[in-house]
Amino acid sequence: MKSTPAGLRCVHRSLAFLVVFSLTLVTTLHAQQPSVYSIEMAVSQGKKSVETDADITFNETTVSIVPDKASMRESAKEFAYSDIKNIDYSFAKKPMLSGGGAVATALLVGFIFALPFLFIKKKRHWAVIQTEKDFAVLRLGTNNHRQIVAEFKAKGVEVSELKEEGKK
């Protein structure tokens, strides 16, 4: 049986430690990166509302929604998870709101905001985020709606799934 010199064993141990340390560091840094998803956000412009491309970013304590267009950046929203009262998720032709959410949204912006949604023909994935003083209407993608809902749930935010009447 051949024995390895002490110096070679020390190099092997150091190399093994370096590999384990590097893998741990990379995994930890990756876990701390905020998750970003592409969505569309309903933004009011004067008396009408339009949908614009946006990014939703899940940070440690907040979620931020920032429109892609520089001209609409003033419509960016940021909500602390602890301030979110309700998130209504629906797969419907227009965003659906729970009873209390509909009243709160109507009081905040009036009924003009809902008019553009009356003409939508296809079903889409919607999320309405509501706090005490603010809200955001989001159209989620067909490929990312599950991940976005899961992100909110992982941050401790309750998500209500609303269904159209007559559907189960």
Image: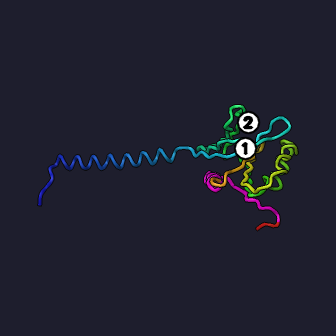
Q: CA distance from mark 1 to mark 2?
A: 9 Å
Residue with the most extreme right position: 111
Q: Secondary structure at mark 2?
A: helix
Q: Is residue 146 left or right of residue 43?
A: left
Q: Earlier in the sequence, mark 1 or mark 2?
A: 1
Return the mark for residue 41: 1
* Image marks 1 and 2: residues in contact by CB distance under 8 Å: yes
Whole-percent x, y for residue 11 in the image: 23, 46
Q: Position of residue 157 (x, y in %)?
A: 67, 52
The residue range painted magenta reads 145-165
Residue 123 sits in quarter: bottom right
Image vertical order of residue 136 relative to residue 156, above or below = above
Q: Position of residue 151 (x, y in %)?
A: 62, 52
Left or right, residue 11 beside residue 141: left
Whether residue 115 can be seen here: yes
Indicate whether residue 161 is drawn in magenta. yes
Amino acid type, label 2: Ser
Are there few (<14), some (14-19), or many (20+) residues within 10 Å of tag 2? some
| Image spot of residue 84 (x, y percent) | 71, 47
Using the image, tell me which numbered label, if any, was put on residue 75. Answer: 2
Q: Residue furthest front?
A: 121
Question: Could you tell me which residue is drawn at 77 percent across and 62 percent down?
Answer: 163
Label 1 crowd (10 A; few <14 / some 14-19 / many >=20): many
Residue 168 against residue 114 in the figure, above or below: below
Disc 1, SS:
strand
Give me the disc on residue 149: none
Q: Amino acid at mark 1?
A: Met
Q: How is the image coloured?
A: rainbow
Q: Nearer the viewer, residue 93 or 150?
A: 93
At 76% from the left and 68% from the top, the residue drawn is 168
For discs 1 and 2, the disc positioned in front in the rendered view:
1
Q: Quadrant of the N terminus?
A: bottom left
